[in-house]
Amino acid sequence: MPASPNRPARIALVSFPGVRAFDVSVITEVWGVDRTDRGVPAFDLRRAAADPAPIPLRGGLSLTPDRTLAWLSGCDLIVVPGLDDHLTPAPAVVLEALRGAQARGTPIAALCGGAFTLAQAGLLDGRQAVTHWNLTDLLHAHHPEVTVVPDALFLRDGNIWTSAGTAAGIDLCLHLVRITHGAEVAATIARSMVTAPFRTGTQAQFIEHPTPESDRDADTLASVRAHALAHLAEPHTVATLAARAGMSARTFARHFQATTGTTPLRWLITQRIAAAQKLLERTDLPLPEVARRTGFGSEITMRQHFAAHLSTSPRDYRTAFRDAGARPEVDTTRADP
């Protein structure tokens, strides 16, 4: 989603009758609010539709387009909201505009049931896609050419992004900001929205309602996670974290995944990457020191995880997202004895 340095990133919210008001609101909240006073770059979000007529939304709301579909040709990102009725046929001109954008290589993101719109356009043929867990069978039944992934928050296949329902749409939007403008910008927007700044796309879509016993476990696990975050530089294993929780490693791993939707080590790697991103954006610390502070141990290990999870290197990440106001940081910590 690279934008010219001389203009704000152009985001198109594709609009047509039947789109979901919640998703329209999410897209608008992420890219349509001016937060430049907090260090967030300006975005040029436009509502693109086949014609300028107001579009009715559920709940007595309406959406007024301010651009035609021709505007998609100059966009850096196109976002397709979900649908109130997931089998709503999109206008032919919308489908054609989406096909043209995909052919040009423009990133396209669909929230929740927006995957059905992309499938109508044929953009998901032979691709992996995700949607709300309760719609996976419906998407597969109507579009068998799509490989529907049943349990993920969001995923990418080529220049196409899809997400699960409701909150996962927020996760995807923030992730798209993160990979384009850096972790600190995404975190600033997340704080403004009072939402979690980062959930990995491979996390489970939902967690079963906990029992009173698992509520107690969740409190214990929360303290373990807090300890790990406060001591990221230290080596942690499932066994050492389980010991802190007073559980066996197997029981701890099972309860951790039931509570958070991910495994202890996957969670730990995600937190270490997020911490490293902040240090790379905010400080001039050498890469080996960033790796040490965030628990990767070595620059090589940190580089391997950045490549696997962010498709970039720590050095390239710093170059892309370096905060111009950051100053060298003096290391006041002491080495472990």
Image (cartoon, grey):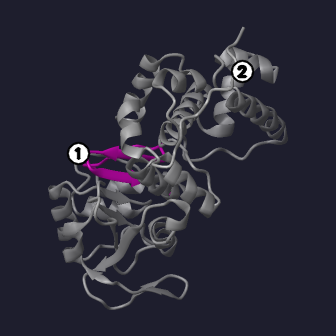
Seen in the picture, residue 228 relative to 139 is either above or below; the reply is: above
The residue pinned by badge 1 equals 126
Query: Does the magenta segment cover residue 205?
Result: no
> Is 258 above or below relative to 158?
above
Quarter of the C terminus within the rendering: top right
Question: What residue appears at the point 79 percent right and 42 percent down from the top-left corner?
Answer: 211
- Marks 2 and 1: in contact by CB < 8 Å? no
Front one among 264 and 285: 285
Quadrant in the rendering for residue 312: top left
Choose mark 1 or mark 2, whichever is in front.
Answer: 2
Secondary structure of the residue carrying tag 1 is: loop
**Where residue 241 is drawn, which disc sits there?**
2
For the residue carrying disc 1, how many other residues have a C-alpha within 10 Å: few (<14), some (14-19), or many (20+)?
Answer: few
Q: Which residues are magenta?
A: 144-165
Type of amino acid under label 1: Gly
Which residue is depicted at the point 36% across and 66% down? Answer: 80
Name the residue rendered at 29%, 80% in the picture: 49
**Residue 195's x, y, as percent?**
62, 56
Q: Position of residue 139 (x, y in %)?
A: 37, 55
The part of the image, by quadrant, that contains residue 78 is bottom left
Please tell me which of labels 1 and 2 falls first in the chain: 1
Of 168 and 234, the residue lying toward us: 234
Tell me, yes or no, if residue 148 can be seen here: no
Image height check: is 139 above or below 304?
below
Q: Using the rendered image of the protein, determine whether residue 120 is visible from the camera's viewpoint.
A: yes
Task: Name the residue rendered at 49%, 66% in the picture.
Answer: 36
* Kind of residue indicated by mark 2: Leu
